[in-house]
Amino acid sequence: MILISKLAASVQPSATLAAGAKAKQMKAAGIRVFDFSIGEPDFPTPQHICDAADKAMAAGHTHYTPVNGIPELKAAICRWYKRYHQFDITPDMVIVSNGAKHSIHNTLSATLNPGDEVVIPAPYWVSYSDLVAMTGAVPVIVPTTAASGFKMSPAQLKAAITPRTKLLMINSPNNPTGTVYSREELLALADVILETNVSVLSDEIYEQLVYGTAKPTCFAALKPELRERTITISGASKSYAMTGWRMGWAIAVKPLVDAMGNVQSQQTSCPSSVSQYALLAALDGPQECVEEMRKQFEVRRNLVYDKLSKIPGVTFPKTEGAFYVFFDVSSYFGKTISGVKITDSFSFSKACLENAHVNLVPGSAFGAEGFVRMSYASANSELEEGTDALAKWLATAS
């Protein structure tokens, strides 16, 4: 009998992917399901990006590439940061990986030792704590509240830092809350960081999906001193609807990028060659497709907020980025719905899927009990019908 390692046994499956798998099983059985669990744009990948992949294959770009990515793509990422964030970087500061999650894993593997601590504000993306724990380091969770807009304060950050703290992981715009830290708020956190030896992993994957007056901020570009202390993570999945292409990148000082490249060389050899040429077209090509998707997401956000705000007992802050609503359902805990006693966000989400056929992700997966996450990366008609089904189900609570 082959024994499972302690590491593998300790890692929990992704809650969002697990929720999506259950919904797919129900759909396969012929059940109409409103699946709002997966963080994936429902738009097709723009045609010019797909065309670039076809051309790359026809040109024979189907073999191994340099471990850190093709030179043309790394140069394009540098141009993009100069254009979008006025941040000057060089190609030797860039490593391209198989998605932003891979970039995060590379970063943690190259920076953390067992016993190191990593400060993570909650709610946080489901994979953060497990990815940290897989290195032997310790995730230090800092709870935030809806009243604060789910933002960690400088005082909270300062209190969480110990002599063992190696990294702060911050995500703005945020998954699951949609929170966008302002430039001033990030500067205040940066001031705390610069009083210590702590570095920052800044996950900016949703940076092009912001609404209203919100603006994305590249943490590394806030102050010259942060350039040496920040690992910037981003990718193509959300902004360019390229989730399946698995294209992410990290930006850091050259010694760290070299170390991450060594890790990646043993893991995957290199990122997908064809996907790299597709990403090159995405970054250097027309950007109107990104703006069109962003506008549609903003319309959907407003639609969902309007619908949810009419449901008794459901509360949430109006957030400014990504494509999620993170709403409080704790008023239903202790009540019975469809014959099921609701005790926490997991039992709420499970009963909601099985009875209302609306698929949400429990807040406990994001380190925030009492809430559930809803993705509004679905057609308007799906969002309207799904929120109506949720409201009808909740109206039966007793």
Image (tube, rainbow, N blue to C red):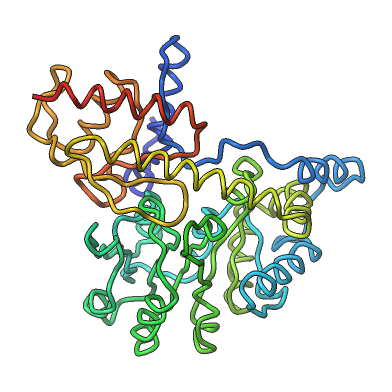
Q: Which residue is drawn at 24% across and 62% down?
A: 144
Name the image quarter holding residue 159: bottom left
In this rendered view, identify the residue nearer to me: 245 or 218: 218
Q: Residue furthest right?
A: 59
Name above or below for residue 125 compared with residue 87.
Answer: above
In this rendered view, identify the residue nearer to me: 102 or 311: 311
Q: How many numbered markers are drawn?
A: 0
Q: Where is residue 388 in the image (x, y as percent from the top left)?
A: 33, 25
Q: Residue at x 40, y 24 (%)?
A: 385
Q: Quadrant of the N terminus?
A: top left
Name the image quarter holding residue 349: top left
Q: Which residue lies furthest to the top in this view?
A: 30
In this rendered view, identify the residue nearer to me: 281 or 210: 210
Name above or below for residue 286 compared with residue 170.
Answer: above
Q: In which quarter of the image is the C terminus?
A: top left
Name above or below for residue 189 compared with residue 225.
Answer: above
In this rendered view, identify the residue nearer to me: 259 or 229: 229
Q: Which residue is drawn at 73% across and 58% down?
A: 283
Q: Position of residue 85 (x, y in %)?
A: 61, 73
Q: Which residue is drawn at 23% across and 79% down?
A: 155
Q: Position of residue 263 (x, y in %)?
A: 58, 62
Question: In this image, 383 relative to 265: left or right?
Answer: left
Question: In this image, 155 relative to 288: left or right?
Answer: left
Q: Where is residue 361 in the image (x, y as percent from the top left)?
A: 33, 38
